[in-house]
Amino acid sequence: MAKNNLVFDAGTIRLDLENIEDFPIRLADIFKFDPRSNTFRARACDYARTVLTLREIGFPFNDLVKNCSPLPELRIHGGLRPHPHQQTALTRWIEHGCRGVVSLPTGAGKTILAVMAIAHLRRPALVLVPTIELLTQWCSTLERFFQCPVGMLGGGSRNILPLTVSTYDSAVLQMEFIGNRFTFLIADECHHLPGAGFQLAAAMAIAPFRLGLSATLEMDDERKHTLQTLMGETVCSIGIDELEGNILSNYQVKRLFVHLSAAENSAYREQRSIYTAFLNRHGISMASANGWRNFLIACVRQPGGKAAFNAFLNQRRIARAGTAKMELLKSILLEHAGERVLIFTADNDSAYEIGRTFILPVVTHHTKSAERKEFLDAFRAGTYPVLVTSKVLNEGVDIPSAAVGVVFSGSGSVREHVQRLGRILRPAPGKTQAMLYELVSAGTSEEYTSGKRREHRAYRRKY
């Protein structure tokens, strides 16, 4: 038997050779020599590529990496009838070697697609999710379909089983210990994965089979490359407009402009001039890739920087929450009285102000988990017909009863805007059409911000 061993070691794979001089040159782009252990070391995610290469060149070795076995008895219970788009996505993923990214709109059944993929492979699987809410939702879904215990990592739990769901944060902390216990890795909301910290969760896992899921894959080229390296290429992408009226609710989008009062407009112009004068003085373009970073650096280093930064915050606050917006919001709430309405803001202050003005429940990142659950359950039941939130409900929350969304304020992010639309598109009994309102302060920077976030096919034909 060969004395060359391939082993899993703290989130890496280590090649221990009987003779260092025997290192296969074909692995030179994967492995690096580690003088500390006098061995060669590579990322755990390169495990499959390493094994295939060693077998191809006929190099004798002992594979001691995996600490798991197939799950031949794993099957779906209770029946599952996939929609055509789900079957299409699964087929394309299988055709690409059970590795790749699938983009489906919110409400199109990404979790069901993952269930189908797990049942197809029947291998130990680890699901990565960004939030505690998604952690519990995924565990419940997997337990329901597979009728077996499902492990949970995160939110105070650390129970590792052949089927396990983990938050990204917890996976990063534990992957050096459990990265060889799963051969199938699923990354939900995988647009988070290219982040400097989160990508370690995928890099330290040996899983040769990978499925990335997201409704919003818009990102820069560097992040796209990172995601493709870790999860595979995008093998299937289906847009909201392709499923509207069938899988998803019909919807309308209305952009409504309001005007600042004379006093608000005067204050806005004053603060705006201080901010833009600072930008011009230091040659900073906020439209450039490093605009925000350069502005922050200049605010710290240059005279007048503190005043310029405060002016930026003040002009943005005025544009986002003028009195006319509050009046328009009041009329929208009256028009849709009795319907489930979600109100989205760009900041916590605006959310709490709306909550105080109209006596509405508010969910922000400050809201405790138990209270958040209480509010969401009451919203689903209709006890609270309106819910105000800043950004924490942009993704990962299943509230199909929501029929009306109001973007009171937001960023220029296309992803955020599409996520907010997705919150109201899930079909529900008695729900015939969804409506998304976007409130914009005319003559302010909000017009530019609104234009940026509407650069998506789901909006272009709706305005």
Image (spheres, rainbow, N blue to C red):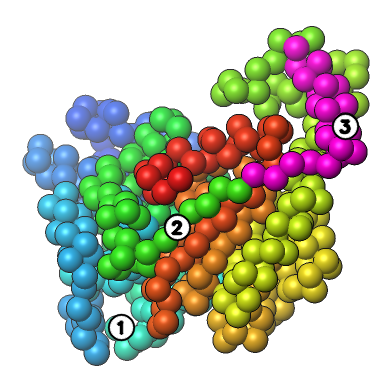
> Based on the displayed image, in which of its 4 quarters is residue 52 positioned?
top left
Q: Which residues are magenta?
A: 257-280
- Whether residue 200 is visible, yes or no, is no
Q: Which residue is rendered at x = 83% and y = 68% of the image?
A: 356
Q: Amino acid at mark 2?
A: Gln
Q: Which residue is mark 2?
A: 252
Q: Is residue 427 above or below residue 265?
A: below
Q: Amino acid at mark 1?
A: Phe
Label 2 CA crowd tier, 10 Å (few <14, some 14–19, many 20+)? some
**Residue 145 shows which numbered tag?**
1
Up-down relation of residue 167 to residue 36 (above or below):
below
Q: Is residue 262 covered in magenta?
A: yes
**Residue 240: in magenta span:** no
Please state if 339 lies on the left or on the right of 374 as rendered.
Answer: left
Residue 260 seen in the figure: yes
- Density class for disc 1 (Cα within 10 Å; few <14, some 14-19, many ≥20) is some
Q: Which residue is mark 3?
A: 266
Q: Can you give x and y, in whole percent of width and height, for residue 352 in the image?
A: 80, 62
Amino acid under label 3?
A: Ser
In screen coordinates, is 18 left or right of 194?
A: left
Q: Where does residue 260 sit, x and y in percent of width and height?
A: 79, 41
Sequence-earlier tag: 3 or 2: 2
201 or 259: nearer the eye?
259
Position of the C terminus, as image quadrant, is top left
Q: Position of residue 301 (x, y in %)?
A: 84, 18
Between 128 and 41, which is closer to the camera in this rendering?
128
Q: CA distance from mark 1 to mark 3?
A: 60 Å
Q: Earlier in the sequence, mark 2 or mark 1?
A: 1
